[in-house]
Amino acid sequence: TTDEIKATRMAHMRPTWSSVGTLLSRNAAPYRSVCSYLCGGNFQILSVRLVPTPRLKHRRQLSGGAAAEAADRPRSILFFGADEFSLASLRAVAESPGLVSRLECVCSPNRSLRKGKRVPQPVVEYAAARGIPVHPYPHSDPDGPQGKWGGLPELAAEFDLGVAVSYGHLVPTSVLRSFRDGTLNVHPSRLPRHRGAAPIQHTILAGDTETAVMVIELSEDKFDHGGILHSVNHTVAPRITFAELRDELGAIGAEALVHTIANYDDLKATPTTQHTLSEAPSLAQKIDKSFGKVKWAEWTAAQFDRTFRATSHQTPLLFKFNGLDVQVLGVTEVAASELPPHIASEVSPPPGAARYDKRTRTVLVRCTDGWVGCTLFRLPNNPRLTAEGLANGYGIRKGGQFQDG
């Protein structure tokens, strides 16, 4: 009603669309009053469609009024995140009506630098656009008067829940223990498999066909060892890239997180410990330049293809040819039945042997067990060279030999 909207505006000064949606769900008119207070009366809302939020999709039926009230209680949340994967969860939490009473973010100040250029983190950009306060931790000067984490335990004590999604740092125990209700983490793997900094990349590197997104409790002093509160399985599509799988799992993780927060009291009472699961523990170590150095005599064709899809956004596949560092920018699978006759008939070509296939305009390179196709390259003097250009300019048409990176 008009009076309710006036009260909302007086209390918050900047009423949100989520609060308007709550009001409209109880009273569908008058829409003109809503716009007059939010937007100065310059336009009218002529129709409204209420869309169910993600938390309703997975929400469990809770028995008893007290349990339902606990699940619906808005909580104050301090969100730790940085990248596109964490942005999906932050957006879902921020835009789910009635889920949070207060929301602020913690982001690493050191993660905005890429190749010498300051690039805003997705979480920081989104928070700024919505007026969500952002706190830079850990401090860039660890030897300063506050140290790396000074002031954060006191800030955390003001919140019910801490939520870390792809934050990239081990949150100190003093901070974890400061939250009133606990801490959560969204992890994109079937734990305890692929614990660590790069679970999505290692899912692709390992050739996994199934994965999961798990909402777990943050554990003290260890990454990804906490009890599992909610889990959603997911099938990994053939030849999927990191960015594609990141976006798929990010969307699933966002819904799973909203569901967990909405049903937190119920789920926290019965966590699943990881040592009871059938998956063998494994470490998803951070991706560095060594992952991109091609080893022709060791890599299978499938390994070459998986490495390109999993890590080339971070570190390009690199090999040497005629003394030059060559990066691979495009890769295709090559079945034995698709090889040209003159290549298929070769007897025991050495790993790293390069042949040009003019039918597909692809440079075919021999791995330990077969051939892989490369369609695009980067050389020191040419940032984007096609396979045909490499063949014509560097003698690959008559055959060549690539060396390890």
Image (tube, helix red, strand yellow):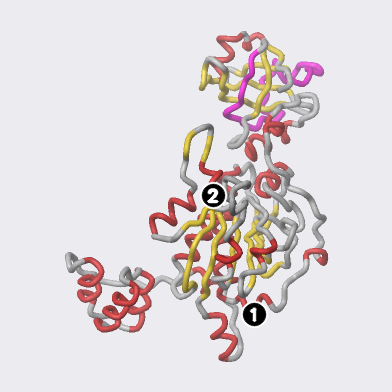
Q: In front of the other: label 1 or label 2?
A: 2
Task: Please name the residue shown 64% across and 18% down the image.
Answer: 325
Measured from the top left, where is residue 96 in percent x and y?
46, 69
| SS at circle 1 | helix
- Which kind of residue does numbered mark 1 sit on? Asp
Task: Please name the residue shown 48% across and 66% down the image.
Answer: 103
Measured from the top left, where is residue 285 in percent x and y?
73, 44
Pick the quarter of the image with the C terminus: top right
Q: Residue furthest left?
A: 42
Q: Are marks 1 and 2 in contact (CB under 8 Å)?
A: no
Measured from the top left, where is residue 257 in percent x and y?
58, 66
Compare residues 67 and 150 and report the one nearer the observer: 150
Which disc is residue 66 wearing? Answer: none
Which of the 4 image quadrants contains residue 298? Answer: top right
Identify whether 253 is placed above or below 321.
Answer: below
Which of the 4 image quadrants contains residue 328? Answer: top right
Residue 346 magenta: yes
Q: Earlier in the sequence, mark 1 or mark 2?
A: 2
Q: Could you tell me how far apart the alpha carbons at marks 1 and 2 are, in whole angstroms?
A: 30 Å
| SS at circle 2 | loop
Compare residues 277 and 397 and report the one nearer the observer: 277
Identify whether 66 is placed above or below 124.
Answer: below
Identify whether 309 is placed above or below 351.
Answer: below
- State the residue position of label 1: 266
Task: Please name the residue shown 48% across and 49% down the image.
Answer: 122
Which of the 4 image quadrants contains residue 34? Answer: bottom left
Q: Residue furthest front?
A: 145
Q: Which residues are magenta?
A: 324-352
Counting other residues with Cα less than 10 Å from the Cα at mark 2, is it few (<14), some (14-19), or many (20 or more)? some
- State the residue position of label 2: 83
- Which kind of residue does numbered mark 2 sit on? Asp
Compare residues 115 and 321 and report the one nearer the observer: 115
